[in-house]
């Protein structure tokens, strides 16, 4: 380890293995000295798609060798977007000078901002746009492979312009998960670019254009590169002919065509790309993860909406069991008070903990949705992430403090407050959907997690107060509710990130949360001390 440091954009590490230096950004490899082959394959195949590129936009790749290869072409300008200036500073310190001196080329203009934010706001137009980024392995990276981003790129391309990026694949045979990811990205690109080519190789190169047909002929690509006098160490004529043989191109086309029916469009509000990428990663192993992901990918969306509908019948069944237990106990012991106490706990004593657990799930949905929606709406996240989480915690404190000052609230008003809080939790996802349609300024967006935290902060002391009315000690009630809230939050994280968001999208996940809280609200309006059979009431009495 040569150096490890953190900036407001993430963590960066420089690692040396003998003479090779590698740079990692947030755990992902972004540059390695002595490996020009990958940069040549990405850059020269992409640059050869345009007959005379003069202006280039490079997102990422400033120290990975891609910028160096771009400058081998007779271009006039290259705008290089690299989010974190610390990455460039560390590259200048540890990478060989020939890898970083291109940063000072007069044709290069560096921008330290989010690549998507730059594409959306720049007034410039480009002949070639190159993405030198990892694949859609996270929701943050997935933003660069969605139909919305492709629309933004098309707007900043000159007539005949080209967008190119590469995705890890296989040179010989594609696994089913790889085929599904590649097919999804191709179908997504087709929504924006009518001219598409996917070139085979260890990494599949996507070439997208609105007007000109991409080249997949090795001889034509080599002729353009030779005409420009581009020096290559690995991508010579023989390597091009081997990579772009007709049978490889045809085999790749056949493999992707077979997945068209299963492949789903990758969008900002339904980020399926990172689920497909996770499935591709899991294909390297055998075990429960791969089987579970395979089941999720083949699961119809309607089944996900059935989960909230199970809350109400499950609760009623539990009520019936507790009522029968109360009858049995009172009959055996001839102490009706014990049976009545158990039945009373089966009312609010069961409803309140269930509601708190579901709120834990809902609050996790609210936070994850806000964190993913923010960079989609505004183009950047990073240093806002702490503010989003901090606003939620501030809301928790404010809601709890407000109820603490009203700690002697009678039982009936406390119950009405409790129901009112859950009505607000039910309506909250609908407010989020409105915000997604008309995004406010970023600072105003912080009101969303602040409100979500305040609702949770109001609920918890109310729930403790209501459980105390059933005869439970305050310490027992608080410990039980805190455990259920944490359990709900944990389940929410496991359900939302790898399952609901990719399968249903942000909008569908909000609708799913509305259904879940509607079921809980129905429980709250059931008569407390619900008795399913009349003889149970007489026996307890």
Image (cartoon, rainbow, N blue to C red):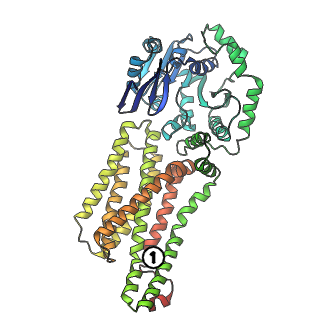
Horizontal side of 84 relative to 210 (left or right) equals left
Q: Nearer the viewer, residue 235 or 95?
A: 95
Q: Position of residue 449 (x, y in %)?
A: 37, 50
User: On the picture, is 110 further left or further right than 471?
Assistant: right
Q: Is residue 254 left or right of residue 505?
A: right
Tell me the SS state at disc 1: loop
Q: What x and y, as percent, mark residue 16?
A: 44, 22
Q: Which residue is mark 1?
A: 526
Rendered view: 261 above or below 190: below
Q: Please indicate, yes or no, whether residue 264 appears anywhere in the rendered image.
A: yes
What number of labels is visible? 1
Say if 306 sits above or below 322 in the image: above
Q: Is residue 147 above or below residue 83?
A: below
Q: Residues within 10 Å of mark 1 (few under 14, many from 20)?
A: few
- Of the 4 image quadrants, the one containing the N terminus is top left
Residue at x 43% of width, y 53% of height: 364
Regarding residue 60, the answer to whether it shows in the image is no
Can you tell which quarter of the image residue 260 is in? top right
Task: Say which residue appears at 47% left-offset and 88% top-offset.
Answer: 536
Residue 39 location (% of width, % of height): 56, 20
Residue at the extreme front: 18
The percent position of residue 415, horizontal first and vertical second, equals 34, 72
Above-or-below relation of 513 to 285: below
Q: Pick the residue in front: 541 or 95.
A: 95
Q: Quadrant of the C terminus?
A: bottom left
Say which of 192 and 517 sits in front.
517
């Amino acid at each position: 380890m040569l150096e490890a440091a953190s900036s407001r954009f993430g963590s960066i590490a420089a690692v040396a293995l003998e003479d090779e230096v590698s740079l990692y950004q947030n755990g992902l490899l972004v540059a390695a000295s002595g490996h020009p082959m990958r940069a040549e394959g990405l850059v020269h195949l992409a640059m050869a798609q345009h007959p005379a590129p003069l202006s280039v936009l490079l997102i990422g790749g400033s120290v990975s060798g891609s910028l160096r290869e771009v400058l081998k072409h007779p271009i006039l300008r290259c705008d290089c977007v690299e989010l974190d200036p610390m990455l460039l500073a560390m590259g200048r310190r540890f990478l060989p000078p020939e890898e970083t001196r291109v940063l000072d080329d007069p044709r290069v203009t560096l921008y330290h901002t989010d690549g998507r934010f730059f594409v959306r706001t720049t007034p410039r137009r480009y002949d070639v746009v190159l993405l030198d980024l990892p694949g859609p392995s996270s929701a943050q990276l997935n933003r660069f492979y969605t139909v919305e981003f492709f629309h933004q790129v098309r707007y900043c391309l000159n007539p005949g312009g080209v967008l190119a990026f590469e995705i890890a694949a296989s040179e010989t045979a594609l696994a089913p998960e790889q085929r599904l990811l590649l097919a999804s990205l191709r179908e997504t690109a087709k929504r924006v670019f009518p001219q598409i080519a996917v070139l085979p190789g260890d990494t599949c190169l996507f070439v997208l254009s609105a007007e000109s047909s991409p080249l997949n002929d090795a001889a034509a690509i080599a002729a353009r590169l030779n005409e420009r006098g581009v020096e290559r160490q690995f991508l010579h004529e023989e390597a091009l002919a081997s990579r772009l043989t007709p049978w490889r191109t045809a085999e790749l086309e056949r493999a992707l065509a077979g997945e068209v029916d299963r492949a789903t469009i990758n969008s900002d509000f339904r980020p399926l790309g990172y689920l497909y990428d996770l499935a591709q990663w899991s294909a390297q192993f055998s075990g429960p993860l791969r089987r579970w992901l395979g089941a999720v990918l083949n699961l119809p969306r309607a089944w996900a909406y059935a989960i909230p509908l199970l809350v109400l019948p499950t609760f009623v069944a539990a009520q019936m069991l507790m009522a029968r237990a109360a009858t049995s106990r009172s009959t055996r012991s001839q102490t009706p008070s014990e049976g009545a106490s158990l039945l009373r706990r089966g009312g609010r004593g069961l409803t309140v903990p269930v509601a708190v657990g579901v709120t834990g799930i809902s609050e996790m949905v609210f936070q994850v949705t806000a964190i993913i929606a923010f960079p989609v709406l505004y183009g950047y996240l990073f240093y806002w992430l702490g503010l989003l989480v901090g606003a939620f915690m501030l809301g928790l404190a404010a809601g709890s403090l407000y109820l603490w000052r009203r700690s002697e609230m009678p039982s009936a008003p406390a119950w009405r407050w409790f129901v009112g809080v859950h009505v607000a939790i039910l309506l909250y996802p609908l407010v989020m959907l409105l915000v997604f349609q008309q995004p406010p300024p970023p600072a105003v967006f912080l009101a969303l997690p602040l409100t979500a935290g305040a609702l949770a902060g109001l609920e918890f002391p109310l729930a403790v107060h209501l459980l105390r009315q059933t005869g439970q000690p305050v310490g027992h009630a608080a410990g039980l509710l805190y455990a259920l809230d944490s359990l709900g939050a944990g389940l929410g994280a496991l359900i939302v990130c790898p399952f609901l968001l990719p399968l249903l999208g942000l909008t569908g996940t909000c609708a799913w949360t509305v259904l879940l809280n509607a079921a809980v609200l129905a429980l709250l309006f059931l008569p407390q001390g619900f008795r399913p059979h009349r003889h149970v009431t007489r026996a307890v009495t």
